[in-house]
Image: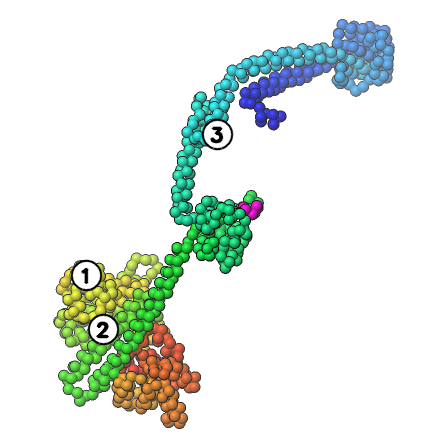
């Protein structure tokens, strides 16, 4: 039935629906009517029989009481007036038939004994057993049987009427359906016609005619909108395919599809020239494809394919293909694994692109990168060597100046000249340090050793080191005001001192005589919750100021404003650039302000404060630690230095300080001298050694000594980067002093090492 209705035309479906509905309604109504009639008739018949049994029983009490069967028979004979009564009988008290109706029927046609009181229906009759009572005493039982033929006659009439009504209503439904179904079938057939036209041509410009605003009308509107959107999408898809075709053609890209169930590989037309093959040279199998791949790349391609299938993910692999002439090209393959409903990989599809040119460019870039890295390394080596070569000649000069400054017999004018010489040597050394610092900043290799330090002490140290003499010569008035309650920051003390030294040096340099330098330190809350106050350091002067056009560039390396300023004041213009980099590495900020030329300048440094540590746990250095113990006793010193001028002047300085000095110009000489000092009174107390020696490195010599004893050492070198210092400490040196050697620094280092050795 379902299959029949599925393939039946809509007209017949509508007719069948209406006819079946009409028939079902009539059948339901007829069934209800017949059921009601059956129940009503049976109840009425049972009631009538009960009344008739009461009357008959009341009339027959005398006959039963006086045992008069003849009278009882006459009473039953009166039942002949009731057409539906077919049998009747009276039973006495013993249950024996006392009288019967009709009398012509034999006793076998009646129940031999009365049954329980009440009525019961069989297929064609209604039987009733009723008691015969006299003043509450049961005298017997009366039996009546009624024929149900009248009920069945009624049911036949009802069935005939129901049939007539059903036929008439079906004919009417057919007529109405034939007339009304046009309103439904015609619009649907119109939609079917348009759909067929779209499917056959295909033509998405056709539209179905709307026949009303009912559900089918809404369906027609939706169908037309669908056709419009499909047409737009089809046009966009065609344009996209055209763009894709042009892109694939221009980018040397092809698409592929591998059916894992059949093992067949399908290529588009762009894949064949991509692999340098014709369509006859590729049979669509994996073996044929792998033959085109470079032998060294086949295992990699198989592995990548297997991993993509097992992981049910994308494939991304590069490989080489070999052309027929033996040349090879680089191919980039990108694909995606598709699965069936059960999650089983069934196909893989993707694109291949010729990346030979990009590979060549990548190789060229790698070579250029390697060349740039080599050049950069060579530049670093050059700068390190340059630093060493520039520093080394300054050491004997600075040592000679220090020795002459200690000579009390030298006249005051010459002392002034010596001070000028020392000051310019220090400036020269500072310029070399700035060059190395800015190189490290550019390469991101400037490292910090941050510890809680007191900025107030860093400022005092920087001002005492520079301003004490420079400001005095220019009669500058320098003042500092510290109103901050929180002055500790997490900083590298030496680097932060360098920042303050640069700023104060600039103020002294660019402030004319009798000017003023004012340093102010205070706290300021930045507004962030759960954070301490910021520490603000202001350094203000009354110098030549900064013009508005130069203000944006003052923190750039190698810039000092106008060229005339560079000629007058000198310098490389690195101090502020280095200072800003150091402050920013400390998560702080530095800004500059000036109202213009000859109106002074103000530099503001902002740093985040930290909790002040206990005095006993504060780090060493200028951050506020207790001074280390020193010893002034005479020592036996082994000086290893291949630069004769430096060795000569350092020997003179060390001897004038009371030490016994033995000089060696190479590692071999030093080892011979150490081996000859076999007695305790001739043993050396300390080694002072240059690192760059003719027959090796001072590190090697220090390692030999560290392996045999505990002789302390001080390294002297023109190399002063952090790694150079760490290398010296790792070799066993106690100190690393960068050339040009400052005599005071060397003297204090010797005294501290002697004190440590004595302890």
Locate the C terminus and report the quarter of the image it occupies: bottom left
x%, y% of residue 235? Answer: 40, 36
Q: Secondary structure at mark 3?
A: helix
Question: Which of label 2 and label 1 is nearer to you?
Answer: 1
Measured along the vertical axis of the image, is residue 454 above or below residue 683? Answer: above
Residue at screen point 32% across, 90% down: 662
In terms of depth relative to the viewer, which is nearer, 41 or 431? Answer: 431
In terms of depth relative to the viewer, which is nearer, 307 or 112? Answer: 307
Does the magenta run of residues contain 699?
no
Report the residue that reaches farthest toward the front. Answer: 325
Inter-mark Cα distance, 1 to 3: 78 Å
Q: Earlier in the sequence, mark 1 or mark 3?
A: 3
Q: Toward which corner of the image does residue 555 lie, by quadrant? A: bottom left
x%, y% of residue 438? Answer: 28, 68
Q: Secondary structure at mark 2?
A: helix
Q: Earlier in the sequence, mark 3 or mark 2?
A: 3
For residue 200, the mark is 3
For residue 550, the mark is 1
Horizontal side, residue 313 vs residue 398: left or right: right
Q: Are marks 1 and 3 in contact (CB under 8 Å)?
A: no
The local crowd at label 3, few if under 14, some if 14 to 19, many if 20 or more residues have their Cα within 10 Å, is: few
Measured along the vertical axis of the image, is residue 441 above or below residue 218? Answer: below
Q: Earlier in the sequence, mark 2 or mark 1?
A: 2
For residue 444, the mark is none
Can see residue 755? Answer: no
Q: Kindly identify which residue carries mark 2.
A: 463
**First to last magenta residue range:** 258-265
The local crowd at label 1, few if under 14, some if 14 to 19, many if 20 or more residues have their Cα within 10 Å, is: some
């Amino acid at each position: 039935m379902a299959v029949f209705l599925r393939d039946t035309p809509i007209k017949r479906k509508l007719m069948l629906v209406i006819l079946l509905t009409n028939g079902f309604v009539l059948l339901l109504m007829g069934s209800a009517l017949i059921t009601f009639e059956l129940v009503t008739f049976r109840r009425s018949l049972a009631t009538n029989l009960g009344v008739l049994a009461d009357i008959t029983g009341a009339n027959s009490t005398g006959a039963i009481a006086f045992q008069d069967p003849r009278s009882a028979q006459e009473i039953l004979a009166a039942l002949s007036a009731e057409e539906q009564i077919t049998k009747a009988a009276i039973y006495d008290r013993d249950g024996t038939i006392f009288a019967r109706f009709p009398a012509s029927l034999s006793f076998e046609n009646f129940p031999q004994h009365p049954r329980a009181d009440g009525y019961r229906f069989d297929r064609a009759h209604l039987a009733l057993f009723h008691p015969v009572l006299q003043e509450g005493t049961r005298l017997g039982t009366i039996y009546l049987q009624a024929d149900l033929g009248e009920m069945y006659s009624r049911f036949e009439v009802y069935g005939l009427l129901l049939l007539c009504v059903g036929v008439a209503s079906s004919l009417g439904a057919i007529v109405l359906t034939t007339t009304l179904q046009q309103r439904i079938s015609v619009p649907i057939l119109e939609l079917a016609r348009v759909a067929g036209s779209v499917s056959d041509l295909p033509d998405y410009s056709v539209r179905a005619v709307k026949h009303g605003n009912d559900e089918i009308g809404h369906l027609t509107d939706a169908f037309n909108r669908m056709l419009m959107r499909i047409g737009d999408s089809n046009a966009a898809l065609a344009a996209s395919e055209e763009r894709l075709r042009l892109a694939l053609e221009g980018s040397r890209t092809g698409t592929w599809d591998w059916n894992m169930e059949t093992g067949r590989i399908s290529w588009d037309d762009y894949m064949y020239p991509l692999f340098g093959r014709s369509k006859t040279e590729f049979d669509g199998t994996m073996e044929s494809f792998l033959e085109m791949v470079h032998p060294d790349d086949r295992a990699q391609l198989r592995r990548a394919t297997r991993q993509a299938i097992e992981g049910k993910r994308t494939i991304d692999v590069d490989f080489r293909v070999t052309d027929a002439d033996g040349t090879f090209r680089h191919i980039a393959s990108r694909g995606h694994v598709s699965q069936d409903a059960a999650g089983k990989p069934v196909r893989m599809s993707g694109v291949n692109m010729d990346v030979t040119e990009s590979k060549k460019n990548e190789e060229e870039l790698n070579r250029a990168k390697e060349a740039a890295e080599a050049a950069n390394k060579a530049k670093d080596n050059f700068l390190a060597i340059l630093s060493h070569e520039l520093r080394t000649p300054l050491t004997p000069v600075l040592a000679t100046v220090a020795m002459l400054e200690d000579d009390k017999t030298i006249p005051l004018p010459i002392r002034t000249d010596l001070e000028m010489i020392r000051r310019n040597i220090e400036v020269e050394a500072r310029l070399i340090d700035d060059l190395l610092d800015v190189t490290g900043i550019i390469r991101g290799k400037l490292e910090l050793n941050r510890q809680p330090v007191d900025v107030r002490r860093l400022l005092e140290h920087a001002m005492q080191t520079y301003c004490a003499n420079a400001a005095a010569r220019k009669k500058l008035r320098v003042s500092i005001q510290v109103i901050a309650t929180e002055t500790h920051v997490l900083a590298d003390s030496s680097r932060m001192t360098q920042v303050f030294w640069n700023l104060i040096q600039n103020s002294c340099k660019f402030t004319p005589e009798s000017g003023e330098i004012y340093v102010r330190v205070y706290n300021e809350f930045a507004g962030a919750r759960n954070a301490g106050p910021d520490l603000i350091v202001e350094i203000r002067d009354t110098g030549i100021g900064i013009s508005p056009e130069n203000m944006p560039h003052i923190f750039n390396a190698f810039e000092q404003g106008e060229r005339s300023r560079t000629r007058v004041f000198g310098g490389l213009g690195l101090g502020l650039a280095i200072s800003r980099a150091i402050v920013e590495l400390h998560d702080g900020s530095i800004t500059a302000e000036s109202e213009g030329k000859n109106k002074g300048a103000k530099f503001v440094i902002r740093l985040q404060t930290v909790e002040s540590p206990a005095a006993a746990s504060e780090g060493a250095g200028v951050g506020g630690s207790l001074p280390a113990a020193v010893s002034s006793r005479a020592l036996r010193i082994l000086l290893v230095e291949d630069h004769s001028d430096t060795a000569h002047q350092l020997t003179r300085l060390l001897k004038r300080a009371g030490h016994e000095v033995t000089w060696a110009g190479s590692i071999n000489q030093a080892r011979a001298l150490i081996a000859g000092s076999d007695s305790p009174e001739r043993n050396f107390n300390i080694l002072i050694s240059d690192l760059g020696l003719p027959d090796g490195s001072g590190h090697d010599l220090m390692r030999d000594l560290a392996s045999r004893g505990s002789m302390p050492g001080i390294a002297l070198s023109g190399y002063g980067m952090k790694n150079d210092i760490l290398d010296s400490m790792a070799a066993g040196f106690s100190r690393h002093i960068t050339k040009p050697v400052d005599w005071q620094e060397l003297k204090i280092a010797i005294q501290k090492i002697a004190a440590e050795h004595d302890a």
